[in-house]
Image: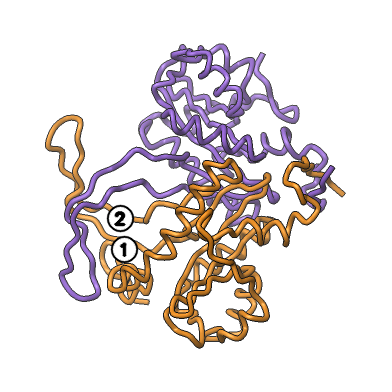
Chain colours: A purple, B orange
Amino acid sequence: MVKYPGGYQKNNNNQSLARGKSNLGKGLEDDINKTNEYYLVYDLAVVHKKPTTIQVVNVRYPNRKMAEITKAFYTTPSTTDYNGVYKGRAIDFEAKQTSSTTSFSFSLIHDHQIEHLQKVINHHGIAFIIIRFSTLDETYYVEAQKVINLYFQKRRSIPYKWFLENAYLIPYSLTPPIDYLKVIDQLYFKGDTDGKQKWKLRWN
Amino acid sequence: MVKYPGGYQKNNNNQSLARGKSNLGKGLEDDINKTNEYYLVYDLAVVHKKPTTIQVVNVRYPNRKMAEITKAFYTTPSTTDYNGVYKGRAIDFEAKQTSSTTSFSFSLIHDHQIEHLQKVINHHGIAFIIIRFSTLDETYYVEAQKVINLYFQKRRSIPYKWFLENAYLIPYSLTPPIDYLKVIDQLYFKGDTDGKQKWKLRWN
């Protein structure tokens, strides 16, 4: 049985029809960028994609005020792609998609991204992974800790069925495409039903 | 500011700082990177510098597994340089240094960085600016809101004397060079004297 945060009902309105499956490669990234922009415009959260990590080798200066990079390479990122702030809390996540219909391979996540997510959790940040099964057109919110636990069991992949039990399906909509804050609200801010209550950080 | 092809912007103070006065510009950045690494190693916080924003124009593929960027430009970042998580809270800051001994010029901060810091504050993140008067060898922690308030008073600069009254001098040490978490502890976590108490997020 698929979990639905907050009594969500599965939106069966032909997600694949609504969106099309033409640009699978950039699809998830675009959807998340649009979502973050929506959150920013409607002042719900401040989340940004980190710039791609690039190692610059050569730079030339055609004139005094201009720098042109003439040789550079993409490097492996040491953290996740997205982070920001929501209701005071640090949120941090990675987004991955797979065309497989049966499993999600751990080869899609870097070791240091796993380490990074664990650190964020240790420091009480909200860490998760958004995983899209692009062929099935299903996008899941998965708490990072659950994925990390499987990772340390030396699994090579996570079966699709595992997601049905352990992850949260994020219904596709247009405003915004991937409304992951709804899942966060259910998991971390249940008392905040109208979104208007003030939070307080208190110490035991 | 005039926009140039490739997203390059002329008169970018940051870049001329980073380039022309490279030693000056890198000193503070190095100190902060070392500090963040110290925090990471001793498991005190998870803070990273965001990669430099670069717009890639041309890429060539010398072989199937290699991508070499042959033309790219530095672009103006839309957020601050540093962010992360400390005791669950999102922290977000920018670091700037000036060789002036009398004032800090607002030309060193981009408009959208001011906007970004305001958004982080609105969402209850901990937002600040680390400002170094390099000639005086003094590094200050300034709450972002105070700087933003002056910014909206259309000030062109902030007098050095203002910092003595309104900012927090961060003593230089080796472990770590710029111990800004100490200031954050005083401002936001006063109850947490031994750093071991557990926090709780509660709703009014």
Circle 1 marks a residue in which chain? B
The kind of residue on which mark 2 rests is: Gln
Q: Is residue B162 left or right of residue B136?
A: right
Q: Do the residues at pointers 2 and 1 share their chain?
A: yes
Q: Position of residue A141 (x, y in %)?
A: 59, 29
Of the pair A83 and A160, the residue shown nearer to us: A83
Task: Check if mark 2's residue and mark 1's residue have beta carbons within 8 Å.
Answer: yes
Per the image, the residue denoted by label 1 is B7
Mark 2 neighbour density, 10 Å: few (under 14) some (14–19) many (20 or more):
some
Which residue sits furthest front?
Answer: B174
Foreground residue among B33 and B78 = B33
Q: Residue at x 39, y 40 (%)?
A: A77
Q: Residue furthest left?
A: B62
Q: Nearer the viewer, residue B160 or A54?
A: B160
What residue is pinned by disc 2?
B55
Residue visible at 61% across and 79% down in the picture: B163
Q: Earlier in the sequence, mark 2 or mark 1?
A: 1
Where disc 2 sits, the SS reads: strand
**What's the amino acid at mark 1?**
Gly
Query: Secondary structure beneath disc 1?
Result: helix
In the image, residue A16 sits, relative to residue B194, either above or below, namely: above
Identify the mark at residue B56; answer none if there is no mark: none
**Residue B7's spot in the image, x, y percent?**
31, 63
Give how far across and how far down residue B108 sits, in percent. 45, 75
